[in-house]
Image (tube, grey):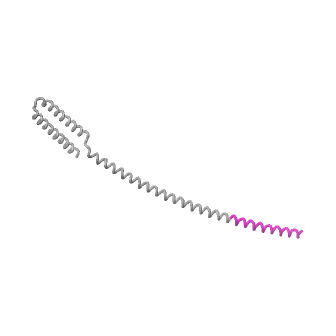
Amino acid sequence: MTAENDRLCEQLAALDARLTERIAGLDRLVESKFDASKIAVDAALLAAEKAVNAALAAADKAVQTAYDSQSKVNEKQNEFRQALLDQQGTFMPRETYEQAQREVARRLENLEQSEASTSGSLSGGAATRVLGFAIVSLVVGVIGVLLAILAATQ
């Protein structure tokens, strides 16, 4: 039995050596797969980081471009607003215009009444002189109103 025990011990020792070698080989295989996975994950993380940095740079550029464009639009709008304010300063006030229109209408009515009352009683030469005087008066009155309007707007 000792011979058989010795043979079984030798077989068991050989089997133990093969299993130990097989386990060591599998450990090396797992270790190499793990190292390869780690390398792949590190490469993927690096690529993702580069992509995020590129996206952030593009977003920053887009924001700056939009800001510059909006600044230009705001500048143009402010120029337009200022032009409107400048233009508004040269407009005649409505009350002044209406007053001038009433004055012109009153003078025209007086002129028409004067012409109607004198057309029957005056001779041709006298009627022409009166009409000429009335027209000159009207022109002088309109010029006076325009000068008053200009003085009021300045």
Q: Please check the rendered image and state whether residue 24 is part of the magenta-colored stretch, yes or no.
A: yes
Answer above or below: position of 66 versus 112: below
Residue placed most toward the observer, 119 or 68: 119
| Rendered residue at 48%/56% (across/down) | 59
- Relative to 136, residue 68 above or below: below
Reply yes or no: does residue 108 show up in magenta. Answer: no
Q: Main secondary structure of the magenta part?
A: helix
Split into 4 quadrants, where in the image is the N terminus? bottom right
Image spot of residue 134 (x, y percent): 14, 36
Compared across the picture, whether 136 is left or right of 87 comes to left
Residue 19 locus on image (x, y percent): 77, 66
Q: Could you say which is closer to the camera, residue 45 or residue 7?
A: 45
Question: What range is drawn magenta here?
Answer: 1-30
**Figure quadrant of residue 135:** top left
Q: Is residue 102 left or right of residue 21?
A: left
Q: Give the camera-side residue of 20 and 40.
A: 40
Coordinates of residue 110 in the picture (x, y in percent):
16, 33
93 on left or right of 77: left
Residue plotted at (21% across, 44% down): 150
Residue, far right:
1
**Residue 49 relative to residue 32: left or right:** left
The count of marks equals 0
The image quarter containing residue 106 is: top left
User: Residue visible at 46% across and 58% down?
Assistant: 61
Percent of width and height locating residue 101: 22, 37
Q: Residue at horizontal 46%, vertical 56%?
A: 62
Q: Nearer the viewer, residue 2 or 135?
A: 135
